[in-house]
Amino acid sequence: MKASGTIMKSFVALCAVFMFMIPSVGTAVPITVQTEANAGNASAGESGANIGSSALISVVVTEATGASSANLGESVGDGTGEISLPAGWTLFSNLSVPPGGCLLTPTEFHNWGNGSYNIRVVPFLGNAFCSWLLGDYHYVVTINKNVGSRVVRGSGLGVLTIQ
């Protein structure tokens, strides 16, 4: 439990530093970012940018009023190569990976149009030796995006478990 507390304190400190580095434009609107990961097709030992070895991170974004935030990025990618997430989106997967594990690479971003989004991920594509390992991959999805005269900001923590 001590290691988990240390990781959380480090994460909070890191987020505080990033928030001070980001310039403020317009009215800041806090959003709630909920994430849930699904190993889907991913199994230990698999690698590469393909649907057959990918996992999905589902993201639901709501404003304080409960309204969904549906206009936070266009769909991009098809799961077969590394992508850049839409402007204002960040996937931070450095928190914790299984011993010897690699970070996550996004290969697809899908906007369902109702405040729901999917981020398809695979093990880091920059190293041919990276593959899924058994265990938990902790990640954070952060959104800091200008939408008209507003800036929507929020983040959500999640865990992807490979069995």
Image (cartoon, rainbow, N blue to C red):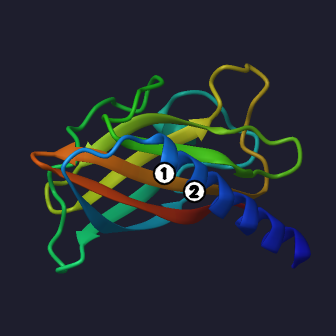
Horizontal and vertical percent position of residue 159: 62, 64
Kindly indicate the quadrant of the structure image that contains residue 11: bottom right
Taking the spot 34% from the left edge, 40% from the top edge, the residue there is 88
From the viewer's perspective, is 108 left or right of 97?
A: left
Identify the residue at horizontal 68%, vertical 39% (top origin): 103
Return the residue nearer the eye: 109 or 42: 109
Q: Are marks 1 and 2 in contact (CB under 8 Å)?
A: yes
Q: Which mark is on residue 80?
A: none
Helix, strand or loop status at disc 1: helix
* Residue 161 seen by the camera: no
Task: Indicate the quadrant containing the C terminus: top left, top right, bottom left or bottom right.
Answer: bottom right
Secondary-structure class at tag 2: helix
- View extreme (left): residue: 148
Residue 128 visible? yes
* Quadrant placement of the N terminus: bottom right
Residue 7 position by quadrant:
bottom right
Horizontally, residue 115 falls left or right of residue 134, namely left
| Point 48% across, 64% down: residue | 156
Position of residue 37 measured from the top left corner of the image (x, y, whole percent):
52, 62
Q: Which disc is residue 19 wearing?
A: 1
| Disc assigned to residue 16 | 2
Residue flagged by tag 2: what amino acid is it? Answer: Ala
* Mark 1 crowd level (few <14, some 14–19, many ≥20, 10 Å Cα): few
What residue is drawn where x is 31% and y is 34%? 87
Image-based side of 151 in relation to 160, left or right: left
